[in-house]
Image (tube, helix red, strand yellow):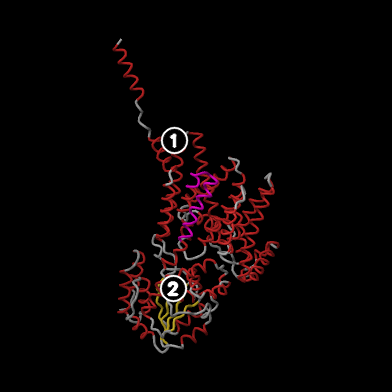
Amino acid sequence: MHEQTLKKNEQTKLNTTPSKPSPFSILHSSFSILYSSSFILYSTLLIGFALRLYVLDIESLWYDELLELDITQHSLNTILPLLPRHTALPLDYILLHFWVLFGRQDFWVRLPAVFYGMLALPVAYQLGRTWFGQRGGQLLMALMALSPLHLYYSREARPYSLLLLGVLIACYAVWHLRRQIRWRYLVMLQVGTLIFALSHFFANAIYMPLFGLLAADLIFSKNRKHVMRVMGAVLITGGIAFATILALGWGGPMLKTSRGFAETILEPERFTLDAEEKPNQGAGPEISWNYFRFKVLKPMVIRHSDIAMWVINGLAFVGFVFLLYQKRYHLAWFLSIWLIVPSLVILAFLLHQGTFFSIRYILSTLPAYLALVAAGVLGVAVWANRLGGRQIATVVSAVLVGFIVFNFVYGVTLIYDNKVKEDWRLVGDFLRKNAHPDDTVIVINGEETLNWYYPPADAEPDTYDKLETVQEALDQTDRSWVVYSIFSPYLPEGRQIKVWLSEQGAIRLVLHHDIAVYYYGRNADPLQLLAEIREFALPVDHRLYASLARENRQNPAVARQYYLLAIENAPDDEVRADYEVALEALQP
């Protein structure tokens, strides 16, 4: 009897011994801890801030940034009259005006955009939490933090990061006002509206999806009086922003532009006018699938992979279907029209105007796109849980999130590695080291660029847009410097100016693949100018050495030295081989 009792006790101990947890349960437990902890919010903010701050000044300020900064360095009372030329609104310019009083470094002037981008992340989290719960909010915030598109424009001294912040605040306020009208949401709506309405004209396209959402509420809601009050709040806050724009003197240009666009909408054949007949005398965006794919779809997600583009776009579509499946029709409707309608209207406007398209013009639609992607991930997880259980759902979710994060992070690294902006900083440094105070320094179509990087330059826009004007300026001093960039040929006489400089014996110094500086002497021949250049403080650049080698062809010994420097500093074997061929071709 005693032995039977011992055996029974042993069997009980074996049965109550906890079994070894499976890898799936450990994985799910780890994810649950992360998702349930506020640690993920702070770590996401920290990662987002670090990514936006990293090598912030590795590239020079580019043309558009310098146009804005040239205006901001004027006195406050002269900023507003300068804006219509650039079709710009004043908020970011005024904020930057005060910011640059404390510093002019590239890193410093880009910091406000970083801050606006960072402020957008917690607003995105609150929106995501409202729509999808805490995990959905965390996911949407993480997608915004890692989005290459949002990160790119959070690192530029331009108003796009600011306008996106305003759009997010306004959308958050409207969504909550639909539930109950409270003063804090009204204040948020007014603040958000003023931010985006005074940052960029295209941001006002957000009114179409907002009123589309409220129109759906008006049709299907039982409390139509409440919906009408919300509509009134949006109209009043928008009216205040519109009145502010009119008070700043934009009434006439806005009326003229709006009337022209309305006429084109009523007469669609005007979209097909020749470029010369359009307001800006350009063709505008191309209407084709390939253009839409490469100019809209890929930049909105990532540029480096077609597979990733289709997978992430597929998740956005799954998110839309999932919202319909959950009978969240209003949210599905709002996110879809927020993504689609402003994009179509802006593309149509650019086609009417004859102006090029850039993905930054529809940056305000990015939160809607990422929200649909987040809904897609959550939907796949829900359906995987129903079909295969919690463990399968955890693995599928981890794979999807990992895939998105990997491709987003890779896209971010490409932003750091691919230096595509013009190097005006290099030009400014070169002139400061080599130009004498009494030398003439001019820029052909882009005078504002050197007004920032080379303070002695202070020319107004379009000062040197004609050959005769350039000739008169060069006759004033013995030595002159003419900066000719990729924007110079757009002038009617741009190419003519370039030809004339070459005919006069000006020496072409290629400082960047988009920028060359012509060194001109009023009473000097090319050989004398080349001799002077040999005493210059030159930046280490293979393109510059190669251009000087070509300019010194009449002096093979000097040309050979420059080709050797170009070969030594060539970026790859292919370029090095080209220089070696040119070196061998030199006459002894």
From the top left corner, tell me how far across and down residue 479 is, in percent: 41, 85
Instruction: Classify residue 547 by image quadrant.
Output: bottom left
| Amino acid at pointer 2 | Ile
Q: Nearer the viewer, residue 333 or 300?
A: 333
Disc 2 element: strand
Residue at 45% in and 55% down: 304
Disc 1 element: helix
Q: Which residues are magenta?
A: 114-138
In the picture, the quarter occupied by the N terminus is top left
33 to 78, vertically: above or below: above
Instruction: Inspect this view and state whether residue 278 appears.
Output: no
Label 2: few (<14), some or many (≥20) within 10 Å?
A: some
Farthest residue toward the bottom? 523
Instruction: Classify residue 440 by image quadrant.
Output: bottom left
Residue designated by label 2? 515
Label 1: few (<14), some or many (≥20) within 10 Å?
A: some
Residue at 44% in and 49% down: 41
Horizontal placement of 59 versus 196: left or right?
A: left
From the top left corner, tell me how far across and down residue 204 is, in percent: 60, 60
Residue designated by label 1? 391
Q: Nearer the viewer, residue 345 or 502?
A: 345
| Amino acid at pointer 1 | Gln
